[in-house]
Amino acid sequence: MRNQNRRKHFLVHKPFQFHYLIYTVILLIVVSGAALIGSHYGIWGLAIDAFSTASVKNKLTTAQQIYEYDQARRPIPSTSSKTSLRTYGATELLSAREREIINEIMNETDQKIALLGLILIIFIGWGSIYVTHKVAGPVFKIKQYMAHVAERDLTVRIHFRKHDELQDLAPLFNAMMSSLDDSYGRVKKMSEESPSEKLREEIQKELSQFKLTER
Amino acid sequence: LATHFVSYVRTTRLISFLLVLLIVVAPPLFPEAVQAAIGANDLKLLKKIQQDSFNYFVHYTDSNTGLTSDSSRPGSPASIAATGFALASFGIATTHGWISYKEAYQRIEIALKTLLKKNTNKNGFYYHFLDSRTAKRIWDSEASSIDTALLIAGALLAASYFPGTNVEKLAQKLYEEVKWPWMLNDSLLFAHGWKPNQGFLPYHWDMYAEHLILQVLAMGSPTYPAPEAAWSSWERKTDTYNNKKIVYSYSGSLFTYQYSHMFIDFRKINDGNVNYFQNSQNASHANSEFCSTYADKYATYENGVWGLSASLGPDGYRAYGAEPGEAYHDGTIAPHGAIGSIQFTPEASMTAIRNMYLNYGDRIYGSIGFQSAFNLDRNWWASESLGIDQGLIVLALENFLNHESVWKRFMRLKSVQRWIERADLNKGSISS
């Protein structure tokens, strides 16, 4: 029996499995797209802005100005500060500023990645729950119904939600339960209405329809 | 009869002497008298300049951090000195109705909270340049002694417009957290600054300059006062220009004679035989006369235009100045130079201001007041204004136009009185 039911292909239920393949691919496209757009505009965009022509010009002017502010306060003859020295001083400042900018970009990148990661975790988490709910819901219901059956309640019937997976399981289960309910119902009725000899025969006849474990 | 005649002559001479004294001495000591002598159109112009200059702080102060840009140039970092002037200017603006009490209060409170919350200082000394958006130290800037003093002075002045409020508490906290003796670095001279990767800068406030406000706040501190000996440790080098004796700064630049005087009323304070109000008056006259002397060489100095002060120039930012001192100049004039001296030299300043505005206003005057500087000889016109220049203009004109209101407020501070006592001032006689 086990050999008869052994799965020989991965695609045992094509619609169901392809359905989940599409879900997973869409989720990955969304996550990758968000990461790509986020890094392009959020991270590299910062770097591109920081090193645009206008920005570099501004920084160069600011570097010169800040260097000259310092010089203006110091007891150094204004005429002694040659252009080469000023350029050197401004370059040092500019270099320090570039390092600060890189650090700022890295810090902002870390923060943005952390934030993006958090958003994606929430999104993926929500997506996973939504998707798995379609499977987990029916499984949960079946588990509950089985518990009822274990307590000998043969009146239970399964009703799945419209978009739940395992829809084809419900009619089979319900047919099985109807069959059992019907059989046990008839056995019960016979035991109530027939004399005992005839009853035994009828019960055995009824039970012979079931495949039972040998005892 | 003879006795009566002698008595009459003596009385007449005395009256004449008093009249001469009143004419010569009173105007400089009592700017209101001079203000009256300045025409109505001039006063209107000065009020316009003050209000327009204030607009710099409205436009270039970040609404989230409250920090003010060093310059109107795009990408300029925030400067703590400019922020100090902004705080003071917002306070002043409430009295004129330029902005509402509530808006001024909020702007000041935001700035003070930013400075107190963020990691913007070392032992209470604030980094010279901060990112106006994040309030982080940038440009490898130093924790600056003089810029911190200008920030604190601005904050304390601003607080005086909002007594009993949270702004007053925050400003006082900002002041009380400054560990002034630390910047002395085990000496009696304040260092220019300190950098995390370098330690104390190798320059000190060792002669007359703009650092008097730093000395005042440091000696008057209720929490970490500088030792009394710090006041007498810096050198008072003296020289003369056109017979005017001046305790001079290295550069001879006007701003060195002005910054501290925006807050402190030095008219009745004598340091030994030096009166720094009179000193700045002499230095301002010297600056004006120096320019006049070179008017045949530099066209910018013609028509009574003067004002050699630190400013942008055709070759970059320079500490332009006059004698005595290094007196580096190339024909570049900073409008804030003459305006910042208006309480010292009202008439000469007014002449320069009027001519600069009327003759070159279309090139150097806009919605935020004057641009930093100009140089006719090289056909160079600054394309930006600096926060510290506009702040100097707002405060100088406030004192001049509004009954010395900044001086009155600042001189009432306990810290200022403490400095006067600890520095043992007011015991000398005034020498001209």
Image (tube, coloured by chain):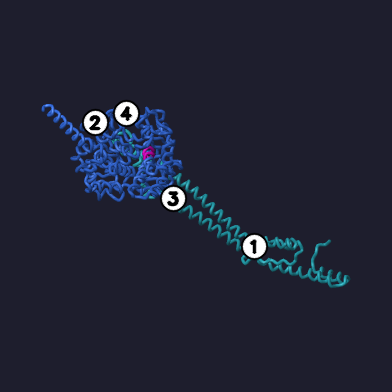
Chain colours: A cyan, B blue
Residue B42 appears in the figure: yes
Same chain letter for marks 1 and 4: no
Q: Earlier in the sequence, mark 4 or mark 2?
A: 4
Q: Nearer the viewer, mark 3 or mark 1?
A: 3
Same chain letter for marks 2 and 1: no
Badge 1 amino acid: Leu
Badge 4 amino acid: Glu
Residue that mark 4 sits on: B235
| CA gap, disc 3 and disc 1 | 47 Å
The relative height of residue B130 versus residue A138 in the rendered view (above or below) is above
Percent across and percent down for residue A106 are 47, 46
Residue that mark 2 sits on: B432
Q: Quadrant of the C terminus of chain A?
A: bottom right
Q: Quadrant of the N terminus of chain A?
A: bottom right
Percent across and percent down for residue A105 are 45, 47
| CA gap, disc 4 and disc 3 | 49 Å
Q: Which residues are magenta?
A: B148-153
Percent across and percent down for residue B340 are 28, 41
Q: Is residue B163 left or right of residue B257?
A: right
Badge 2 amino acid: Ser
Label 2 crowd (10 A; few <14 / some 14-19 / many >=20): few
Residue that mark 1 sits on: A11
Q: Secondary structure under badge 2?
A: loop
Furthest toward the right, the residue is A197
